[in-house]
Amino acid sequence: MTKNLLFLFFKTTKQKLHSQEPETPQKKLAEIGTQLREYREQQSISLDKVAVVTMIRRNLLQAIEDGQLDQLPEPIYTQGLIKRYAEAMGLDATKFADFFPPIEPPARSRTKISWQHLPQLRPMHLYLFYTFLIICSVNGLSQLMGSSVTAKNGAGTQELALDRQKQDSLTASASSTSKNQKPDGHVAVKAAINGQKSDKSSNKPVMVSLTFKAESWMQIEVDGKTEFEGILPIGTVRTWEADRKLVVVAGNAGGVMIAVNNGQPELIGAPGVPKELVFKADELKPAAEVKNQG
């Protein structure tokens, strides 16, 4: 009888301990991702549209919905991504962010220094140390000054050699030009120089140049084929060309300036607002005509 009572006591205690085990971050993330996916599918919103509105990469949104913790950044950044996703869906972002708190790093143990065990320095030791420090400083300064003087002398010798070569080449070219040049030789030389300049104008009827004043997610479609999809940082300058149609989708329209067929650059739209632009070849002037009119 006593053995049966002890067995029941240990069994109930073990069940209570298992029921009080805290949820792991993996389980919490899986619950959050399931709730966000169910709400998104109820609203018939695609994951690509969520990526455009939130300016979060699609693979990160997919990892949140699938509960793949190893595919996400550090917990504090993941918390911000979940909060932005929930705000885009019109949900209580604070509730979702608090449901997945960041993991605090373990506290580091501090070691106490015992001053009694440190060796004591005597005046003789300090004198030797100062003497050694002064000798090293003097040697370092002397070597530094010697290397700088040598470098200056070498640079001066190289400059003199280059000046002599330039003078010799100018003298030779002047003598050959005075012997062989015709009255209209300068006109021919100028024409040859102008002929060597490459024409950088576009050969295709649609050319779009983008300059990024702020970070923005972009999608570029050229003649029905996606050429680029991702986030471009501030200061980036990119150009795309098309034969028939070119589609530009910006997640942050206020941070992107666009110039069509070498025209004047202008902002796509308002900051933080996504926008889509379509350029067709039969509706635009060729780049050469726009350049001549400018």
Image (cartoon, rainbow, N blue to C red):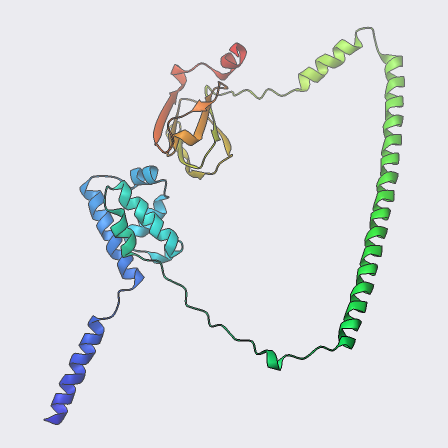
Residue furthest out toward the top: 183
Residue 134 point in image, percent of width and height: 81, 63
Number of dots carrying numbers: 0
Q: Is residue 252 visible?
A: yes
The quarter holding residue 69 reads: bottom left
Residue 85 lies, with reference to residue 138, above or below; the image says: above
Point 20% across, 47% down: residue: 38
Nearer to us in this view, 227 or 250: 250
Residue shown at 44% from the left, 14% from the top: 285
Q: Position of residue 128 (x, y in %)?
A: 79, 72
Q: Is residue 207 visible?
A: no
x 49%, y 13%: residue: 290
Picture quarter with the N terminus: bottom left
| Spot occupied by residue 201 in the image (x, y as percentages of width and height) | 55, 20
| Quadrant position of residue 200 | top right
The residue positioned 18% from the left and 76% from the top of the image is 15
